[in-house]
Image: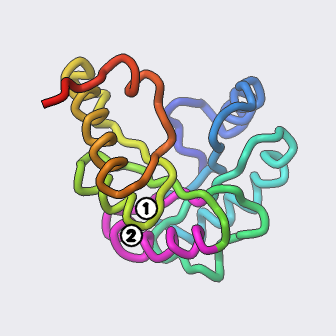
Amino acid sequence: EFRRVLFRSAEDWFRWLQKLPKTMLFSTVPDVLGDASATRSMFEEWYPRLATIGVPISYVTQDGETVENIPWDRIDWLFIGGTTEHKLGDGLKLAIAAKKRGRRVHFGRVNSYKRLQICASVGADSADGAFTRFQPSVNVPIIADKLRKVRQSQQFSFYSIPLLDETYKSEEK
């Protein structure tokens, strides 16, 4: 069942998605937190429609996901979702498998410097988190600084976020 957080239904979500500019990094097919089997069922249901609108498609991993279960031939991105245990366990292995197959990798719920470093260590291309949602005037500069440190220390580059890169430059110390 579609989780009603921002939309009343999956159909509402899909109508909204169709109206967006096609410049997004990716769109995920609806998923079921912590349940790989249910997420795969949702993927099979929604993939044909999502494939018609011309955006890169991401498959969200969940607890219990296996390399063999991922529809590699139909995705552009692998989104590492699921519980923290999954993200820091099997999710890391799945991220490496995705990179070996030429897919981009996104990690969800990354709210610490340590987690950013872990994502970078397996070649993640992007990450998200709610850290900046709380006290943005304080936390956006903090996360922007952490992203710069990860980029420098890992010889790694997450996608550039102009708001973070230009608006909240840290002072050189």
Query: How far from the left and from the top, in percent, is residue 43?
Result: 70, 59
**Image check: 118 left or right of 60?**
left
Q: Quadrant of the C terminus?
A: top left
Residue 156 higher or lower than 142, as above or below? below
**Residue that carries the numbered disc 1 in the rendered image:** 82
Relative to 154, is 133 above or below? above
Q: Quadrant of residue 97?
A: bottom right
Disc 1 residue type (three-letter):
Gly
Location of residue 84 (image quadrant): bottom left
Depth check, front residue: 161 or 155: 155
> Callout 1: 10 Å neighbours few (<14), some, many (20+)?
many
- Looking at the image, residue 107 sits to the left or right of residue 66; the answer is left
Q: Could you tell me which residue is drawn at 38 percent across and 70 percent down?
A: 86
Q: Amino acid at mark 2?
A: His
Bounds of the magenta segment: 78-100
Q: Give the vertical position of 37 relative to 135 (above or below).
A: below
Where residue 141 appears, x then y in whole percent? 25, 26
The tag on residue 86 is 2
Vertical relation: 173 (above or below) 149: above
Dots 1, 2 in contact, CB < 8 A: yes
